[in-house]
Amino acid sequence: MNLKAIAILLSIFFGGSCVALHGADQKLIDLLVEKGLLTQAEADTISQQVPAADKSLVDLLVNKGHLTQVEADTLDEPNARQVDATSGQAPKIFVSPKSKMVTSLKFSGRIQAQYDNYDGVGSGESDREHFYFRRIFLGAHASLGDHWGGDVVMDFADGNAFLDGASAWYQVSDALRIDAGQLKVPFGLEETTSSSKIKAIERSAMNRQFAETIKFNARHTGIFAKGKLENGLSYGLAYANAGQNNNSKASSLKSGTYGYEQEAQGWWGRLRYDGSKDSLGYFGGIEYGSMPMGGIYEGGDFSAYNLFGNLSFGKLNLGGEYMYGEAEISGSANQEHAGYMIQTSYDLDGSWELVYRFSNVNGADDTVNAKEIIRRANVGDDTFDEMDQHYIGVNYLFQGHDTKLMLGYEINDLEDTSGDGGTDVDANGMRARLQILF
């Protein structure tokens, strides 16, 4: 054997700082042991440090006559590795990304199987009893060094692929991260809390009025910034397209109560403070945003602010938020929308959790949309002036949020007090959800 070749080989394996090599495949290591080029002890050390074969090293060994081309070709085949499930150690799965600059690559998933049993809303409407998938998320999250990265999360629950979120980002420091893509704008405590961690099965009436009926907050495409400052302060900013989910095919999007101007942007901002003292934890903040309206409302803006807060003391948690928004109507009186949510939960023993939430939302005549707020119910006349919603639920956390069963009952009182002959309606229903995260 050429001593110079051996020296080069060993320097590659044990002196990785001198050569930009991304690793050796386990098959290659085993083959080198078989040929006597490495000892088993050296191979064990290498296999713990490096996960993937480097083509330049393989080509060098073929050229030197230490490997045949057939042996080199077999190194590209997947190598299944068995893991002892009883060992208590999580299996390590090695993935070779296309970019050699990737330093971290993670995959994520969320499955929410749901059952709804809901009264029909309005005279003559049938009840609804249905099993379905509320969410099926698959995501990929990459880091390229200490500063650059990207995330993509898709939802396949309704039979079509929906872009839940995607962005390319640059992390300057803990005080500043910049994202370009489609994300949720910083508005709404419930809305910006992950659906995997909310305590009620569906978000509140107030939240859904602003996010689903008016389509003011939730997902927008643009530039985002966020960071943690000193003394418990944090912030979030967004400058993004006015239309919800407006990332390419704007003409096919649902426009909400006041539409949106396709070639215009809105902005949203949040300032938050987190603190604790002894066994008391708390946070609170304020959010504000403004978005250009479209269609017959073009030329005006919809602007809103949100106050939110939360207290946790031992096993007891209390949270709430208040939203107020106003639409500028040219040649007519502005239209106002307001609502609030109060939620309390109690952890019984680390697994069982009791939840109660009350929410109220009111708006201009016939602008509270029951069909958007009461998800999946059969709704007749969907326009009301005010709505009260009670939610009573119990959650069982088998493995924290990773494996969770939720059961809840909703009571909705819808009031139509305008002079259009509308009547008040009650709509109640039960929901159940099983969640798996991975």
Image: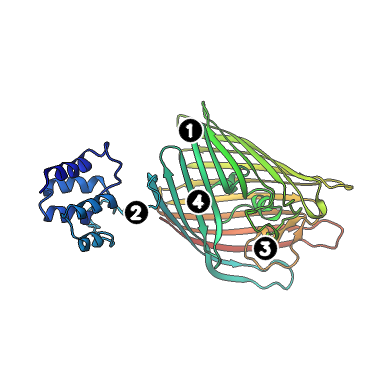
- Give the class, few, some or many, for how many residues have Cα within 10 Å of label 2's Cα (few <14, many ≥20): few
Position of the C terminus by quadrant: bottom left
| Amino acid type, callout 1 | Asp
SS at badge 4 = strand
Residue 191 placement (x, y as % from top left) = 59, 48
| Between 55 and 346, the one nearer to me in the picture | 55
* Disc 4: which residue: 354
Choose mark 1 or mark 3, whichever is in front. 1
Choose mark 4 or mark 2, whichever is in front. 2
The label on residue 427 is: 3
Pick whichever of labels 1 and 4 is earlier in the sequence: 1
Judge left or right: residue 253 versus residue 310: right
For marks 4 and 2, give the CA distance. Answer: 41 Å
- Image marks 2 and 1: residues in contact by CB distance under 8 Å: no
> Is the residue 327 above or below the residue 425 in the image?
above
At 47% from the left edge and 50% from the top edge, which residue is drawn?
353
| Amino acid type, callout 4 | Leu
For marks 1 and 4, give the CA distance. Answer: 35 Å
Residue 147 placement (x, y as % from top left) = 45, 37
SS at badge 3 = strand
* Disc 1: which residue: 174
| Amino acid type, callout 3 | Ala
Residue 143 placement (x, y as % from top left) = 42, 44
For marks 3 and 4, give the CA distance. Answer: 22 Å
Pick whichever of labels 2 and 1 is earlier in the sequence: 2
> Is the residue 276 above or below the residue 399 in the image?
above
Q: Residue furthest right?
A: 331
- Image marks 1 and 4: residues in contact by CB distance under 8 Å: no
* Disc 2: which residue: 95
Pick whichever of labels 4 and 2 is earlier in the sequence: 2
Q: Residue furthest top?
A: 231
For marks 1 and 3, give the CA distance. Answer: 46 Å
